[in-house]
């Protein structure tokens, strides 16, 4: 899966995405430090163990480098940033029963806006699955020749040695 690049200085207005999520009863906000275990349990139950370490790393930062979507006091989605590597967006996900209501777009824009506020001009969305989503929501563009990227470290290390 390729990486994508987002121009943070050209992010779309997040208000419509947040309003759409709010109409569905979903509120987007930065995760609180005491929600770590709750978020990790949600991620494990909904997406498996693959993102646990990255999500946990978000709570080692201040402010916490993760946003949550909350409906009826329950976490239904999340979006982290600056946890895999600096300037990387993700991981992010929304529970299947909460998809289609705008939470994913609102989470994405909230995390990307936080990256912009931290001083980044661009963000990398690594190992993208839903490329069309990121292109539509944030204007992301595929980075050519970015596969395998950092997520296949052994292949990436071999390519680095070969090019050195």
Image (tube, rainbow, N blue to C red):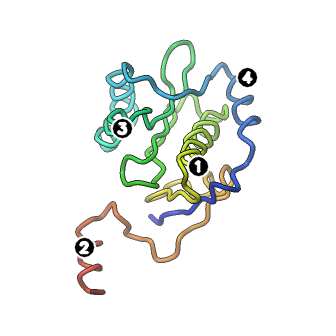
Q: Nearer the viewer, mark 3 or mark 1?
A: 1
N-term-proximal mark, 4 vs 3: 4
Q: Secondary structure at mark 3?
A: helix
Q: Are marks 3 and 2 in contact (CB under 8 Å)?
A: no
Of callouts 4 and 1, the N-terminal one: 4
Q: Residue at x 42, y 48 (%)?
A: 82
The mark nearer the N terminus, 3 or 1, is 3
Q: Is residue 87 above or below residue 158?
A: above
Residue beneath disc 4: 23
Dot 2, how many residues are within 10 Å of its Cα: few (below 14), some (14-19), or many (20+)?
A: few
Circle 3 residues within 10 Å: few <14, some 14–19, many ≥20 = many
**How far apart in space, not on screen, are marks 4 and 1 (Cα)?**
26 Å
> Residue drawn at (61%, 53%), measured in percent from left and top?
134
Along the viewing direction, whichever of 41 and 116 lies nearer the viewer: 116
Q: CA distance from mark 4 to mark 3?
A: 27 Å
Instruction: Please tell me the numbered disc located at residue 116.
Output: 1
Q: In the displayed structure, does residue 9 sit left or right of residue 81?
A: right
Q: Residues within 10 Å of mark 1 (few under 14, many from 20)?
A: some
Give the x, y percent position of residue 55. Answer: 36, 38
Q: Which mark is residue 157?
A: 2
What's the mark number on residue 71?
none
The residues bearing labels 2 and 1 have C-alpha atoms spaced at a distance of 29 Å
Question: Which mark is first along the chain, 4 or 2?
Answer: 4
Of callouts 3 and 2, the N-terminal one: 3
- Which residue in the structure is indicated by mark 3? 55
Q: Residue 1 in the image: x percent, y percent?
A: 44, 64
Q: CA distance from mark 2 to mark 4?
A: 46 Å
Pinpoint residue 156: horizontal percent, then vertical percent. 30, 72
User: Residue at the location (69% across, 31% down)?
Assistant: 18
């Amino acid at each position: 899966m390729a990486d994508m690049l987002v121009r943070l200085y050209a992010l779309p207005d997040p208000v419509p995405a947040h309003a759409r999520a709010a109409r569905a009863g979903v509120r987007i906000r930065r995760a609180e430090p005491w929600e770590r275990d709750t978020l990790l349990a949600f991620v494990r139950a909904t997406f498996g163990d693959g993102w646990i370490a990255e999500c946990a790393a978000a709570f080692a930062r201040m402010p916490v480098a993760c946003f949550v979507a909350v409906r009826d006091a329950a976490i239904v989605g999340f979006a982290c940033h600056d946890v895999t590597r600096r300037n990387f967006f993700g991981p992010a996900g929304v529970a299947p029963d909460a998809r289609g209501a705008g939470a994913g777009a609102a989470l994405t824009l909230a995390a990307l806006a936080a990256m912009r506020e931290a001083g980044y001009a661009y963000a990398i969305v690594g190992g993208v699955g839903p490329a069309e989503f990121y292109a539509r929501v944030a204007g992301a563009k595929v980075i050519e020749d970015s596969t395998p990227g950092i997520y296949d470290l052994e292949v990436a290390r071999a390519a680095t040695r070969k090019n050195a």
